[in-house]
Image (tube, grey):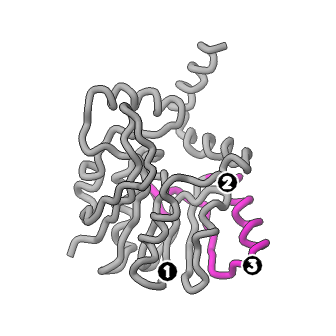
Amino acid sequence: MFIFCRLSRFGMLLNPHRIRNRYDALGRKFRRMMDPLPGLEAAFATLHSRGPGRFLDIGPGPGRHLQYYRDENHYVAIDLSQVALRQLKRLRRHREMDNVAIVQGDVQALPIEGIFDGAIMAYTLTALERPQAALQQLAPLIRPGGHIVILDALPDRRTLLRTAANIYTRLVNLADTSTPIESIVKGTLLDVTAKEPLEHPWITLILPPARVYTLEPQP
């Protein structure tokens, strides 16, 4: 059984739709997907710190982000999972949140246009096959003076131990936690302008702690 499960995980890595399938499966576990995430409140506080505006939420899942949305803003929530978006739409309707638009799509090939005051990706960047391509797609959509807020577990530098541990996280969670943010943003026309450690981050000897990163368009 153990070998079969591991082979199934490996098969997911070879499946071009593995990320969508993974989060569709998680989306069906609605209660689990609504549990609080470390740093989410701090990340949205950073997103909103420059005043009201129009914001992108990349990978909102089935609705745990809605509690941090503010009435004075407009949000476009984009997720790859149909299951998660169905639940998100039900919550939006239940809470009568007319300031939230919901779009199915891949951040690595964004299906939207327009200019936004900011964007947020909470534990989404490490789940992407091509995180640099995602940031390249996002950068032109952020106005001068706007920012992209990243909440994720990324290392300050590569280490042999974390590279080895990353093989496990790729198999279990389809997440790449081995690449520093500075390496990801190269060539994206974005700069890392702030790194905020969480008050209670996920800290282990192997996996990097979660932080709130602020990226800004280059002048």
Q: Residue at x 48, y 63 (%)?
A: 110
> How far apart are labels 1 and 2 at the CA level?
24 Å
Q: CA distance from mark 3 to mark 1?
A: 18 Å
* Residue extending farthest left: 219
Q: Amino acid at mark 1?
A: Arg
Q: Which residue is mark 1?
A: 54
Quick one: 219 or 209, which is closer to the camera? 209
Amino acid type at circle 3 is Glu
Where is residue 96 shown, x and y percent of the image?
75, 78
Q: Is residue 196 left or right of residue 99?
A: left
Pointer 3: what residue?
96
Say few, some or many: other residues with alpha carbon within 10 Å of mark 3 (under 14 / 14 to 19 / 20 or more): few
Circle 3: element type: loop
Three-letter code for the amino acid on which mark 2 is drawn? Met
Q: CA distance from mark 3 to mark 2?
A: 19 Å
Which residues fall within the magenta stretch? 81-110
Q: Which mark is residue 34?
A: 2
Quadrant occupied by the C terminus:
bottom left
Find out whether residue 115 is within the magenta segment. no
Q: Nearer the viewer, mark 3 or mark 2?
A: 2
